[in-house]
Amino acid sequence: MSTATEISEFIFLWEVVQGVHFSDVPDLITWKWTANGLYSSKSAYEVQFSGSYCTFNAQAIWKAKTEGKHRFFTWLLVQGKIQTADNLIMKGIQCDPICSLCHQDSETASHLCLHCSFAQQVWSLVRIWTDGLVLVPAQGVNVQEWWNSALQVPDAAKRNRVAAILIYTVWNIWNERCRRVYDNKAIPAAHLATIIKQEMETLKMAFTLYE
């Protein structure tokens, strides 16, 4: 030690070391993320999200009575990660940037599933057969805002039903987009709304059988 700083640091370290007391008790490794100190894969998974904040109601997606592929699609949709034209172009993939449903505006997740004139027709029909339980998306809202606001239902059973209807509706709007892009086929909004309603009825029967 040749400087005052080094001497000061040595003294500080010496004082800290003096507070350490050793014993003959064997060392014990504990996992601080569980109450009993034992490791579990569940706690290890959950700690990865410690401090993170989700800006949308993700639980409503995973609890919805729908097929897994529909829930996963919606989870991507709400985060704006489905393969719409804007996302494909950002990845350097050449494609038509215009919405294939209305042929008017650029294709984004919000436009395609909520604000496109075709999507608005579908939502209007869904609102009718659900007696206003599901509303037509307001112009200008993004997907997360729409998802969160649409689920502001106090009754848990109704909220789960709303989530399922929302999921099946956006899924079928997406399928119609893919049908037009890849198969060069199209069905009218009224027909698509009928398909959504039939799928919901089939879904209700299926879950009733296993309850």
Image (cartoon, rainbow, N blue to C red):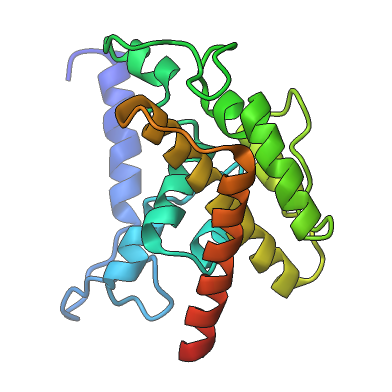
Location of residue 112 (image quadrant): top right
Count the labels in the image: 0
The reply, left or right, for residue 166 in relation to residue 16 is: right
In depth, the one of 71 and 60 nearer the eye is 71
- As drawn, 136 above or below 141: below
Residue at image coords 65%, 67%: 160
Between 21 and 131, the residue placed more toward the observer is 131
Does residue 5 appear left or right of residue 201 in this picture?
left
x, y percentage for residue 98?
Answer: 49, 12
Say whether residue 23 is visible. yes
Vertical placement of 99 versus 198: above or below? above
Q: Position of residue 139 (x, y in %)?
A: 76, 26
Q: Is residue 5 above or below residue 147?
A: above
Q: Position of residue 202 (x, y in %)?
A: 51, 72
- Is residue 142 visible in the rendered structure shown here? no
Q: Assign the N terminus to one quadrant of the image.
A: top left
Q: Position of residue 39 (x, y in %)?
A: 27, 72
> Which residue corresponds to the image point at 21% horizontal and 75% vertical from the top-left?
28
Figure quadrant of residue 23: bottom left
Q: Front-most of 105 and 65? A: 105
Q: Is residue 147 left or right of residue 27?
A: right
- Which residue is located at x 61 percent, y 39 percent? 189
Instruction: Say if 76 sits above or below 194 in the image.
Output: above
Compare residues 207 and 131 and report the one nearer the observer. Answer: 131
Q: Residue at x 58, y 34 (%)?
A: 113
